[in-house]
Amino acid sequence: MQVPFLSFAPQHQPIREEVISAMSRVYDGQWYVLGQAVADFETAYAAFNNTKHCVGVANGLDALHLALRALNIGEGDEVIVPSNTYIASWLSVSFVGAVPVPVEPSPVTYNLDPAKIEAAITSRTRAIMPVHLYGQACEMSAIMDIARRHNLAVVEDNAQSQGAMADGKLVGSFGDANATSFYPGKNLGALGDAGGITTNSEELDHKLRTLRNYGSQKKYYNEVIGYNSRLDEMQAAVLSVKLKYLTEWTQQRQRAAELYNQHLAGIGDVVLPAIAEGSTHVYHLYVVRTNERDALQKHLSDAGIGTLIHYPVPPHLQQAYAHLDMKPGQFPIAEELAKTSLSLPMWPGMGEQEVSLVAKAIRNYFA
Ligand SMILES: *Cc1c(COP(=O)(O)O)cnc(C)c1O
């Protein structure tokens, strides 16, 4: 492979000793679930995200699910979700027995379009779930304004966007309870599954800690029907080390994106990422669009360049959501994005040589 879709090497090699020694401390400490390493990471991540609390959980999907549970959203309720997100956002709504109500994104930024939200609000709507897709912050001032006017909760899906900002404020600090994922490939990734919820509410923090641990605060005394969704000590220890480098890695992603923007300008019908005014982008993914997506992907694959499609089928057309009876054509922007989007190689430490190899192969295709 000339250029893989993603390489962990530039991130992981320089901090190898630091990570191994953090893992050794957990190994030797003989305490493996909900101990000091989790508490330390929660404190550090809350500080990074500029929120009062962070609750570590098992993965990003659980983080979304528990956030909705803690807000008492359930049967008979509706939650507004983007029509073009990863299925996890919708699944979390379904888990609590509520109905996901899709709203189309901006065809320019690919994020939830605030101008389309109010038309989807009904007497059953309880929350809005903005997803900062690909790493770009949603237009949160407008979304928070709508939520306040209609008395709706906000649960941010911050899985792809740790460190991105909207109007100078960090994503993950706007909503009532905000979920993030530390899946290995995310901007802050563990060495396995992990997730977290950030909140400024003491009450939600307490509820979430209870929900993630069998509905229990005091061992063997159960207040509510809870879950086993705990962040483990080993992953927390790794995450605390990696968090120290996140800002530097984000800058490297942004530098690679800038290089792509320069190298890819004006090629064929290729549409480059666009950033909303007031938002920043941390490039979890660098996504371009072209009407020749499938042929271009094959051309790049033949040239030894790894790409992926985020996402080939929008949630409303997934078999899992057949019961909602949504039809092709019902969410045309999401469907168009699914047909034309292509994620190019992107990782912290990706060099100009790799960007230029990818750009050259794309130029060759359109030549
Ligand atoms: C990765 C991701 C999730 C789910 O995270 P997991 O840790 O894989 O459960 C949720 N939403 C979005 C947008 C994601 O990209």
Image (tube, rainbow, N blue to C red):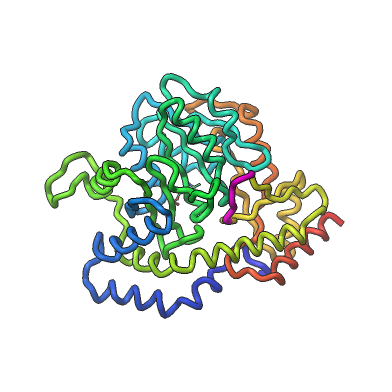
* Identity of the residue drawn at 41% across and 45% down: 178
> Residue 259: x and y, percent?
71, 63
* Identity of the residue drawn at 22% across and 47% down: 214
Quadrant where the C terminus sits is bottom right
Q: Quadrant of residue 17?
A: bottom left
Residue 280: say if magenta: yes
Residue in the foreground of this view, choosing between 128 and 338: 128
> Residue 69: x and y, percent?
32, 37
Question: Outermost residue, bottom direction?
Answer: 17
Q: Quadrant of residue 215?
A: top left
Marker count (numbered): 0
Question: Outermost residue, top direction?
Answer: 123
Question: Outermost residue, front direction?
Answer: 168
* Residue interval drawn in magenta: 277-282
Residue 140: say if magenta: no
Quadrant where the N terminus sits is bottom right
> Residue 72: x and y, percent?
31, 33
Taking 288 as reference, is 205 left or right?
A: left
* Identity of the residue drawn at 65% across and 51% down: 287
Main secondary structure of the magenta stretch = loop
Q: Quadrant of residue 125?
A: top left
- In the rendered image, the vertical position of residue 282 relative to residue 92, given as above or below: below
- In the rendered image, the vertical position of residue 10 relative to residue 173, given as above or below: below
* Identity of the residue drawn at 53% across and 46% down: 132
- In the rendered image, the vertical position of residue 249 relative to residue 295, given as above or below: below
> Residue 186: x and y, percent?
50, 58
- In the rendered image, the vertical position of residue 149 relative to residue 194, given as above or below: above
Taking 219 as reference, is 166 left or right?
A: right
